[in-house]
Image (spheres, rainbow, N blue to C red):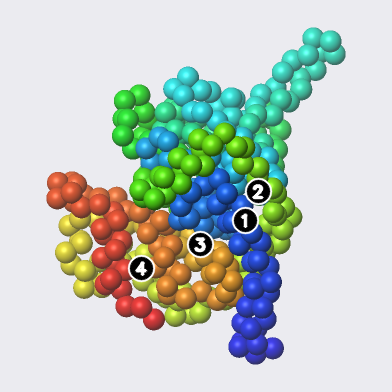
Amino acid sequence: MSGAQEIREINEKVKKESVFVVALMAELGKVIVGQNYILEKLIIGLLSDGHILLEGVPGLAKTLAVKTLAAAIKTKFQRMQFTPDLLPADLTGTTIYSQNDGKFTVKKGPLFANLILADEINRAPAKVQSALLEAMQERQVTIGDTTFQLPDPFLVLATQNPIEQEGTYPLPEAQVDRFMLKLKVTYPSKEEERQILERMTSGNEIKINPVTTPEEIKAAKHTVSQIYVDEKIKNYIVDIVHATRNPEEYKLNSLKPLIAFGASPRATINLTLASKAYAFIQGRGYVTPEDVKTIGLDVLRHRIILTYEAEAEEVTTEDIVKQIFDGVEVP
């Protein structure tokens, strides 16, 4: 079978299988007003097995968005409020001794769900964060001496509040790197806020109907993995990530003193996977440079570590990523 024919076939398959995305977005839109950017990225995370870090002030419907997504997919949802006194066993579960038969039984923790909302992840101590990250990376949890596989799909959505720094434990870079996407949740527009007012104060309960199933998501994930990525696009992705480490090779000399550390190879992998999922959402069986650009900021914004000079000049990682996308040649 020729390459062109293969692309045509995958394109047809994607068109058929991505129909549920429109229904899912419409169902989420019944509750969530105007946060299409967030909703789209949640679906991308789901389709590419990538965990998501959401940053935004309280009250911007971060929890509501995740809860609504779980209801629309008919999956098990767990919300965990992270606090400084939380223990790893509060997440993973523990063994309980039964006096009746003298045996230990395993009581599984809230991590055994499909969609996990880790609220205010930066409020929990390091041990709890590492327990969550082990589950995210290995997709398994060890309780006592038994290892349990976590369900599929398994997606962690963690939120952090950017304004209150008191009593928080900032996430180390190695942990932040485990999140495929970091999303900035912003305030709604005036019109959207008016809509929120109407919808949330009318006293009418909004019923969410399941429009897809975990099985359908699994099948879609398999199709996403088959989406065609041209050699030129692969080189483009590698160039973008490489430019975060060696900007001078791409004539971006002004960025050299601003970047302490560039993105890791995990960024290359995640940028490719997220671009494939984004193409799927658009109903396409191949990735375009535009897909890479659209998703690139969310994949890279938390993976570049700035120098003191950049912080003194109030340069953000977003500014740097935008300059890299402007500077690296598009195929």
User: Disc 3 or disc 4, which is closer to the eye?
Assistant: 3
Q: Quadrant of residue 11?
A: bottom right
In the rendered image, residue 214, in percent from the top left (x then y), is placed at: 71, 52
Of pointers 1 and 3, the one earlier in the residue sequence: 1
Q: Give the alpha-carbon distance from disc 3 to disc 4, as whole Å.
A: 15 Å
Label 2 sits on residue? 72
Q: Nearer the viewer, residue 130 or 84?
A: 84
The type of residue carrying mark 4 is Ile
Q: Nearer the viewer, residue 288 or 205?
A: 205
Work out whether mark 4 precedes mark 2 in sequence or the reverse, and give the earlier one.
2
Which residue is painted at 42% across and 28% down in the image? 123
Secondary structure category for the residue under label 2: helix
Q: CA distance from mark 1 to mark 3?
A: 18 Å
Q: Which residue is mark 3?
A: 274
Foreground tag (3 vs 2) = 2
Q: Amino acid at mark 2?
A: Ala
Q: Earlier in the sequence, mark 3 or mark 4?
A: 4
